[in-house]
Image (tube, grey):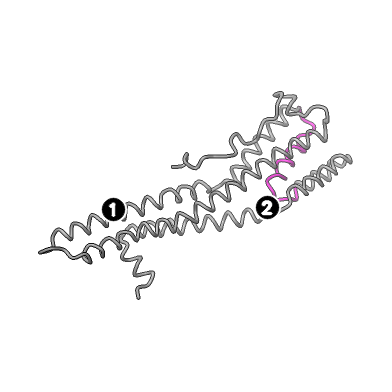
């Protein structure tokens, strides 16, 4: 009975490339999971407590709550509260700039996962095609009529790289979509936090409206197509 290592060796040199992809992909998946878990849960409840403090006129307490939280939404709230005494345009610009930086940190290395998810099947397919070429070339050099087993042996070995490529790509693609969805949710909560703070301080007209006449999203495009990565 052949072991996984035997299959790996039979797959050829490109199996090492797929192995490198799998190691990098697993590292990114674990690292992002640790980062997202460190943010904690219940951003909506946390924001409700901040708004209660703001409506009660306890702005320093609300600012301290923002500084003590590690959630990306708290960072945007912190910048907003630190710029309360500044002009509305300056405050909005600072919040948008900080929001972009925070989202960049939230989405860090997600493009790596997307790239691995796209490239692994292609590398596997390349290995299969190269293996088929070698298999048919060896059949051509055989004396007499080739047996079906001669061809089948080369073909199944060539298909190993495609199998391993899919094994690497599927978890990376699933993790990419899950993490990207989480990043989208954080972006929406950041926009909600800014709007809620505007309403709490200026119920009749938010500071964002005072600048542009409409709410300016912190994220230009929440739903990114993965095809742009390829």
Residue at 13% from the left image edge and 63% from the top image edge: 145
Q: Nearer the viewer, residue 116 or 90?
A: 116
Among numbered discs 2 and 1, the one appearing first in the sequence: 2
The furthest residue to the bottom:
1
Q: What stretch of residues is rendered in magenta?
A: 67-87
Residue at mark 2? 39
- Element at label 1: helix
Residue 41 percent across, percent down from the top left:
71, 53
The furthest residue to the right:
56
Residue at mark 1? 129
Quadrant of the frame with the C terminus:
top left
Residue at 74% from the left image edge and 41% from the top image edge: 77
Residue 29 percent across, percent down from the top left:
54, 56
Q: Nearer the viewer, residue 74 or 209?
A: 209
Residue 48 percent across, percent down from the top left:
80, 45
Report which quarter residue 143 is drawn in. bottom left
Mark closer to the observer (2, 1): 1
């Amino acid at each position: 009975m052949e072991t996984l290592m035997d299959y790996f060796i039979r797959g050829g040199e490109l199996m090492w490339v797929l192995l490198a992809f799998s190691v990098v992909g697993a590292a990114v998946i674990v690292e992002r999971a640790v980062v997202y878990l460190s943010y904690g849960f219940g951003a909506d409840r946390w924001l409700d407590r901040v708004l209660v403090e703001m409506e009660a006129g306890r702005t320093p307490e609300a600012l301290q709550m923002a500084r003590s939280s590690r959630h990306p939404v708290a960072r945007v709230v912190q910048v907003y509260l630190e710029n309360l005494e500044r002009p509305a345009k300056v405050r909005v610009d600072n919040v948008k700039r900080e929001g972009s930086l925070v989202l960049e940190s939230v989405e860090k290395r997600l493009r790596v996962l997307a790239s691995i998810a796209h490239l692994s099947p292609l590398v596997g397919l390349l290995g299969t095609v190269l293996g088929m070429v070698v298999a048919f070339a060896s059949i051509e050099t055989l004396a007499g009529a080739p047996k079906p087993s001669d061809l089948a042996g080369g073909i199944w070995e060539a298909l190993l790289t495609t199998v391993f490529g899919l094994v690497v790509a599927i978890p990376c693609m699933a993790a990419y979509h899950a993490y990207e969805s989480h990043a989208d949710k954080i972006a929406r909560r950041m926009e909600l936090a800014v709007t809620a703070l505007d309403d709490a301080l200026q119920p009749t007209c938010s500071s964002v409206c005072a600048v542009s006449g409409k709410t300016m999203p912190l994220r230009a495009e929440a739903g990114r197509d993965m095809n742009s990565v390829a």
